[in-house]
Image: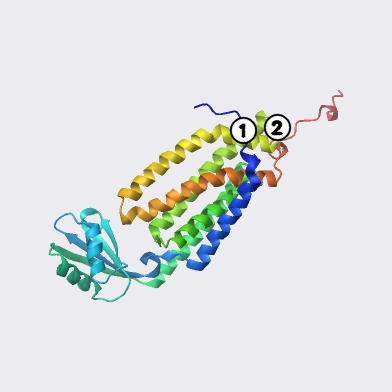
Amino acid sequence: MKLPSRIPFMAIRNIAFAVTVVISLIGLGSLFKHGLNFGLDFTGGTLIELTYEQPADLELIKRELGQAGYNDAVVQSFGSTTDVLVRLAGDSPDLGNEVATALRKIDDTSFEVKRVEFVGPQVGEELRDQGGLAMLLALGGILLYLAFRFQWKFGVGAVGSLAHDIIVTLGILAFFKVPFDLTVLAAVLAMVGYSLNDTIIIYDRIRENFRMMRKADIIENIDVSVTQTLLRTIATSLSTALALVALLVFGGDSLGGFALTLLIGVVVGTYSSVYISAPVLIWLKLTSEDLIPPAADAEGVDDRP
């Protein structure tokens, strides 16, 4: 597939910026109105490990727990198909026996309760705070890295792009009340890395084209650079999205939130790499002088013996 040498991506940058502002405001509004649906990793609760004699049917177990009144139970495989983790809100020391009794009343499948552990809300709060701190440190490290690797204007563009990705993704998760647990937090951090990688590839091409296209302005440079990396971006995004769709469909509840979060991140990150991180360079008036040392002025050189 042969692309034109230059697709005018930046011709609609103002429209894209307006769309970006609207989407970001909707995301922030969703976060403030609904809030994140924190899972038991953050809110605290009881963890029950069950061992079955035969491979366990997770969907059946979840339905059985729902019939017994445990509608918010999280059911996951643990190590093998016969080991199951059940996570519930509550701190009753008899909760494990109560769950086992409820399951045996509905289904006579043989299993045993191996362990029952309680995760207090204080531990969950610490996990939530540490996760937020990790995200802030990641953004700060990215800003410093790009400032040294490229130039500070690139760092501002990348952090602005990543902030947009995080706000929109969390806003979507809040609106649809997707349980936010440690796997989803890991997906958000992975999304940051994915989006940053896409942005750096475009930034690197912009820097190289400043050396090769010395008479081109920043808008022409960005259009050419994004066009040159477009096939790579499409191939990477599509292949990643296909793998995530497979996880979303076949991975079950344990991987559903992770796959959905990353899938949203791939779409949002691809958009922001083109229409947020690149236009910031235009608004900050990036020039070749910001990247290339000025050539020596021949008239100013003293060639006297």
Residues at marks 1 and 2, CA–CA distance in whole angstroms: 10 Å
Q: Tell me if I can see residue 155 in this picture.
A: no
Residue pointed to by mark 2: 216
Q: In the rendered view, does 246 fall on the left or right side of 152?
A: left
Inspect this view and state whether residue 28 appears. yes
**Among the 4 quarters of the image, the one containing residue 93:** bottom left
On screen, 67 above or below 265?
below
Q: Is residue 144 above or below residue 6?
A: below
Q: Residue at x 25, y 62 (%)?
A: 62
Name the residue nearer the viewer: 240 or 197.
Answer: 240
Q: Which mark is residue 246?
A: none
- Label 2 environment density (alpha carbons within 10 Å; few <14, some 14–19, many ≥20): some
Answer left or right for 161 relative to 282. left
Query: Which x, y percent locates residue 106?
Result: 16, 67
Name the residue type under label 1.
Answer: Val
Name the residue: 51% across, 49% down.
268
Count the numbered circles shown: 2
Quadrant location, the C terminus: top right
Q: Secondary structure at mark 2?
A: loop
How packed is label 1: few (under 14 Cα within 10 Å), some, or many (20 or more)? many
| Residue 250 location (% of width, % of height) | 30, 49
Circle 1 sits on which residue? 224
User: 249 or 75, which lies in front?
Assistant: 249
Q: Which of 217 and 112 lies nearest the eye of the viewer?
A: 217
Hey, which residue is sitting farthest top in the picture?
305
Q: Where's residue 269, x and y in %?
A: 51, 47
Residue 74 in picture, x, y percent from top left: 30, 63
**What kind of residue is marked 2?**
Ala
Q: How is the image coloured?
A: rainbow
Nearest to N terminus: mark 1 or mark 2: 2
